[in-house]
Amino acid sequence: MILIQVIVTIIALGIVLFGLVGRQTHATRAWKKILLAIFAMTMVVAVLLPDTTTQVAHVLGVGRGADLLLYMLTLAFIGYVINNYLHQQSEKDTVHRLARKVALLDAYSRYNMKEKLGDEAESKK
């Protein structure tokens, strides 16, 4: 076994361990953990059996295994960017709603409008 194969295999195992049992992984969705595990297994297979990627590439109509890996990496990156963008938009919306609530609560307390706060809370129920 070549040194780079050992290094990449150890890194892949580290990625899986970090992704499955690392900090704050309880908030990660199950499908993301499954994709991470599949990615790591594919990475190990591609490193340990490089001819396999070429065979899969030929089946899919791609000339070389390296080209197939580049295409897959490009697709994974685009998926990551889209997922990250959607997550950031969701976070922005949450912060915006929280800022509005804080501003309303501040206005109610500043101008002694406690009775309106109770009426508004009841009307939303």
Image (spheres, rainbow, N blue to C red):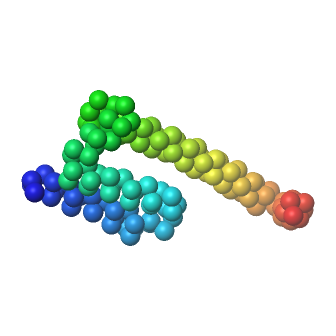
Please, which residue is most extreme toward the left here?
2
Q: Is residue 120 above or below residue 87?
A: below
Image quadrant holding the C terminus, namely: bottom right
User: Which residue appears at 28% of the width and 41% of the height?
Assistant: 55
* Observer able to see residue 102: yes
Q: Nearer the viewer, residue 104 or 89?
A: 89
Q: Nearer the viewer, residue 73 or 121?
A: 73
User: Which residue appears at 86% of the width and 59% of the height?
Assistant: 124
Residue 36: x and y, percent?
Answer: 40, 56
Residue 21: x and y, percent?
Answer: 38, 70
Q: Is residue 7 left or right of residue 83?
A: left
Q: How many marks?
A: 0
Q: Nearer the viewer, residue 88 or 96?
A: 88
Q: Is residue 43 left or right of residue 110?
A: left
User: Which residue appears at 9% of the width and 53% of the height?
Assistant: 2
Q: Is residue 43 left or right of residue 38?
A: left
Q: Nearer the viewer, residue 64 or 23?
A: 64
Q: Is residue 26 above or below residue 44?
A: below
The image quarter in which residue 75 lies: top left
* Observer able to see residue 99: no
Image quadrant holding the N terminus, namely: bottom left
User: Which residue appears at 38% of the width and 59% of the height?
Assistant: 37
The image quarter in which residue 77 lies: top left
Q: Is residue 1 left or right of residue 89?
A: left
Residue 57: x and y, percent?
Answer: 32, 37
Residue 8: x and y, percent?
Answer: 20, 54
The image quarter in which residue 25 lies: bottom left
